[in-house]
Amino acid sequence: MGRGDRGDAVRDLQRRLTAAGFGPARAPWGYYCDETRAAVAAFQHDHGLTADGVCDDVTWHALVEASWVLGDRPLHLRRPNLRGDDVAELQRRLGRLGFDPGRVDGILGPDTANALTEFQRNVELTPDGICGPQTVRALERLQSRAATGPAVTVVREVERLSHGEPTLQGRRVVVGHLGGLGSLPLTVSRALQARGSSVLGLDDPDGAHQARAANRFQADVYLGLVTATDGSIAFYATAGFESVGGHCLADLLHEELAPLLSHHVAPPQGMRLPVLRETTMPAVLVALQPGRPELDHSPAVAAGIARALARWVVAPVTVHRS
């Protein structure tokens, strides 16, 4: 849906925006006017999505997920996995109490189910892996005891990345092309292969499809490349959680690429785009402006990307600022 659309679907969108705290108060009901577009863009920005004011599938699903509050429904492992802001809140609370649910992605997978069961066992509830009213009350009762430092998920990511080999030799790297960059992704893949990496190249505009392929490949790191009006570099982050490995790599990419590009590249930002959210390894998405002359001479840009990755495997959780 976008500007000028009318009908029941727009009314449903406006109701969901209002429930999420972004209601277009003066917008005509059922009309996708400029105010509705601005409300959608504000919601997208707040939820780490591309803030273009267009309600695409990703934005719609994010609105649906935002409607769930912890305690609204029983949470348990199922197929397809439950998704929602209530799942993300469960993951945050478990992590602060020392139970590792995996990354805070709002997707209730096996790691979250195992952490939930362990929590129930520790507080002497039936360890059935179902987050119902009793479990929610136990989580609320224990919040005052929650750790104030990094959650256990972040600590384990730091530990895992810190013990990796400090070389690209043998590292499994996914280079995902989401559209518009011609030969650059292939040149990047070749530059990484020259350093000994095992590279899987993907060419698919659907970020969720790319994330699933990267997970099946059991990649050490995911690098996405796409065109955008404004240059940017993104890593996965949501309320109360960020991928420290992804953030570090994004900083290094910014350091290497900013001097090579004729257009401004904004400082790295945390986002919740599907390709960042659904990958299980550190992931970054590099968006470059199309039609730039330096992209026609992509070896220099590809070499900069390869240098950033080579620096990252040496110090994958050291914070760099450009």
Image (spheres, helix red, strand yellow):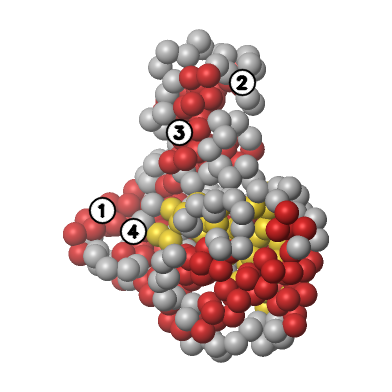
Examine the rendered structure and indicate whether residue 92 appears above or below residue 217: above
Residue where numbered disc 4 is placed: 93
Q: Amino acid at mark 2?
A: Arg
Mark nearer the N terminus (2 vs 4): 2
| Quarter of the image where the C terminus is located | bottom left
Residue where numbered disc 2 is placed: 3
- Mark 3 → mark 2, Cα distance in angstroms: 15 Å
Q: Amino acid at mark 4?
A: Arg
Q: Amino acid at mark 1?
A: Glu
Residue where numbered disc 1 is placed: 140
Q: Is residue 222 left or right of residue 321?
A: right
Examine the rendered structure and indicate whether residue 86 appears above or below residue 5: below
Mark nearer the N terminus (1 vs 4): 4
Residue where numbered disc 3 is placed: 42
Q: Position of residue 56 (x, y in %)?
A: 63, 35
- Mark 1 → mark 3, Cα distance in angstroms: 30 Å
Between 164 and 52, the one lying in front of the other is 52
